[in-house]
Image (cartoon, grey):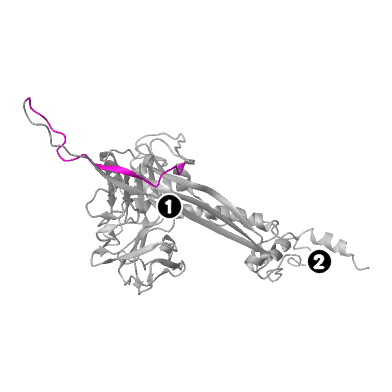
């Protein structure tokens, strides 16, 4: 019998991998068939299919209103009514003492978030071959856009203070899973004799999210058990910065006399001053279960300060805890789906009775995977925080919408590469922190 032709062999191989004359794996791409060692096209992809295995949800970013920056670098807040300026007056009595309101200045400047990507000229060519990913620049551009918005969402939800498990003159260590809350360029200080100092040399220069080691410039020495507090952000202000207040406990350690993460005044947040959040509930670094009492207190404090909660923001762990709490107290039979919209996001489908949770007391509940977590006094990572927010006073002010810049100057790069850059200039602004609240030190 004559040897079959190549076309016959190929035809046979397509009848079934396990009946093929070539065997089951002869025509499958192998991991050692690497076209470009710099990009590993065949190592990282199979054919033209690229599976996205990362969480790219940006729910909080989508829920917060976005506005044009406007012609402003800040605003003023009336912080008291004046002493004794209003009182009853008898028919012949004297008038109240003349007094004026106390006006505080809030400064706010835009922050820049950038995302880069690139590809070598060789990878751009080989990606177009059979088994490649196609237009590698378009693919990386699409992925970079997802990463860019994800970075903004993570910055909006970053924690503002954590306990160091080890420290030195230029480094401190936190649990690896929360190291992402520190960003290069953030200014970090520690509690020094009960008062949080501000040293210009304590700027973060590197973050290792695998080991939890954060590197800072010489200036502030950290030790095991010290509190590392971000008092100035390089990136966008987080909601945790907004609700940070003086003398609150983080992991059982007081953050000292003042906080400057959300820079309401150049002098910072002085103990007992006007700029404390409505309510910050903590438990000295000891985990506890979420309860309706904790949630009701946060809602009550906001309403007592003249606000009306518009959003409950939490992680998925607290979402399921709250659902179980309300399920056990369910008294009504109703299964119609009910969703509430916040910004461009919607809550999970539920019922008005709370059987499958969508709202609590009419307040939409939004779980986000990027909500920051608490840390216990023993350096154990606890559950996510719960925020109760009046979003009427929260906005993302955009100074420059996201821009895309592409560079093909091989001489400037000193390499045959095509580089891309996405950047956004914006900042989250909270014009009334009196009506925002936070619940910390919760179990998972």
- Magenta segment, prevailing SS (helix, strand or loop): loop
With respect to residue 88, does 200 lie above or below? below
Residue beneath the point at 60% across and 54% down: 405
Q: Position of residue 439 (x, y in %)?
A: 31, 51
What secondary structure is marked by label 1?
Answer: helix
Give neighbour class at mark 2: few <14, some 14-19, many 20+ (Cα, 10 Å).
some
Residue that numbered label 1 is attached to: 156
- With 420 as the anchor, is 252 left or right in this view? left
**Residue at the limit of the structure toward the left, as seen here:** 92
Image coords of residue 325 (percent x, y):
34, 46
Whether 254 is among the magenta residues is no
Work out whether residue 27 or residue 368 is closer to the camera in this orientation and state it: 368
Q: Which tag is nearer the camera, tag 2 or tag 1?
A: 1
**Residue that protrudes farthest toward the right in the picture:** 2
Q: Nearer the viewer, residue 300 or 352?
A: 300
Residue 424 image point, x, y percent: 51, 51
Which element carries disc 2, helix, strand or loop? loop
Q: Earlier in the sequence, mark 2 or mark 1?
A: 2
Q: Which residues are magenta?
A: 66-91
Q: Residues within 10 Å of mark 1 (few under 14, many from 20)?
A: many
Q: Is residue 404 visible?
A: yes
Rendered-image quadrant of the C terminus: bottom left
Provide residue 378's location: percent of width, then percent of height: 31, 67
Answer yes or no: do the residues labelled 2 and 1 have beta carbons within 8 Å? no
Give the residue drawn at x 23%, y 40%: 101
Quarter of the image with the N terminus in it: bottom right
Q: Nearer the viewer, residue 238 or 12?
A: 238
Tag on residue 170? Answer: none
State the residue position of label 2: 21
Q: Is residue 167 above or below residue 240?
A: below
Q: Is residue 21 left or right of residue 316?
A: right
């Amino acid at each position: 019998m004559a040897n079959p032709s190549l076309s016959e062999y190929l035809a046979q191989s397509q009848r079934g991998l396990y009946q093929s004359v070539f065997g089951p794996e002869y025509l499958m791409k192998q991991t050692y068939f690497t076209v470009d060692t710099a990009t590993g096209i065949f190592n990282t992809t199979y054919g033209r299919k690229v599976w996205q295995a990362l969480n790219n949800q940006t729910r909080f970013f989508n829920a917060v209103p976005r506005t044009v920056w406007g012609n402003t670098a800040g605003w003023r807040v009336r912080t008291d009514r004046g002493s004794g300026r209003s009182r009853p007056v008898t028919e012949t009595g004297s008038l109240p003492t003349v007094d004026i309101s106390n006006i505080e200045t809030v400064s706010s400047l835009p922050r820049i978030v950038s995302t880069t990507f690139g590809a070598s000229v060789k990878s751009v060519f080989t990606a177009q071959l059979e088994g490649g990913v196609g237009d590698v620049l378009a693919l990386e551009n699409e992925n970079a856009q997802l990463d860019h918005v994800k970075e903004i969402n993570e910055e909006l939800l970053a924690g503002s203070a954590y306990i160091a498990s080890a420290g030195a003159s230029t480094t401190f260590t936190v649990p690896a899973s929360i190291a992402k809350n520190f960003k290069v360029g953030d200014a970090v200080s520690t509690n020094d004799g009960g008062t949080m100092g501000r040293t210009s040399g304590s700027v973060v220069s590197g973050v290792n999210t695998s080991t939890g080691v954060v590197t800072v410039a010489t200036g502030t020495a950290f030790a095991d058990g010290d509190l590392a507090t971000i008092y100035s952000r390089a990136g966008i202000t987080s909601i945790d910065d907004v609700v940070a207040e003086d003398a609150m406990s983080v992991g059982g350690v007081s953050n000292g006399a003042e906080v400057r993460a959300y820079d309401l005044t150049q002098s910072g947040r002085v103990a007992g001053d006007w700029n404390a959040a409505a309510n910050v509930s903590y438990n000295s670094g000891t985990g506890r279960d979420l309860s309706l009492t904790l949630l009701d207190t946060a809602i009550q404090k906001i309403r007592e300060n003249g606000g009306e909660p518009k959003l409950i923001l939490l992680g998925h762990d607290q979402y399921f805890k709250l659902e179980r709490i309300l399920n056990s107290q369910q008294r009504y039979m109703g299964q119609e789906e009910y969703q509430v919209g916040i910004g461009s996001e919607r809550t999970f489908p539920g019922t008005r009775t709370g059987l499958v949770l969508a709202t609590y007391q009419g307040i939409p509940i939004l779980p986000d995977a990027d909500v920051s977590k608490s840390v216990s006094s023993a350096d154990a990572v606890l559950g996510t925080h719960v925020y109760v927010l009046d979003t009427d006073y929260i906005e993302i002010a955009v100074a420059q919408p996201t821009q895309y810049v592409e560079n093909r100057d091989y001489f400037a790069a000193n390499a045959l590469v095509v580089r891309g850059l996405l950047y956004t200039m914006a900042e989250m602004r909270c014009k009334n922190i009196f009506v925002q609240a936070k619940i910390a030190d919760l179990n998972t």
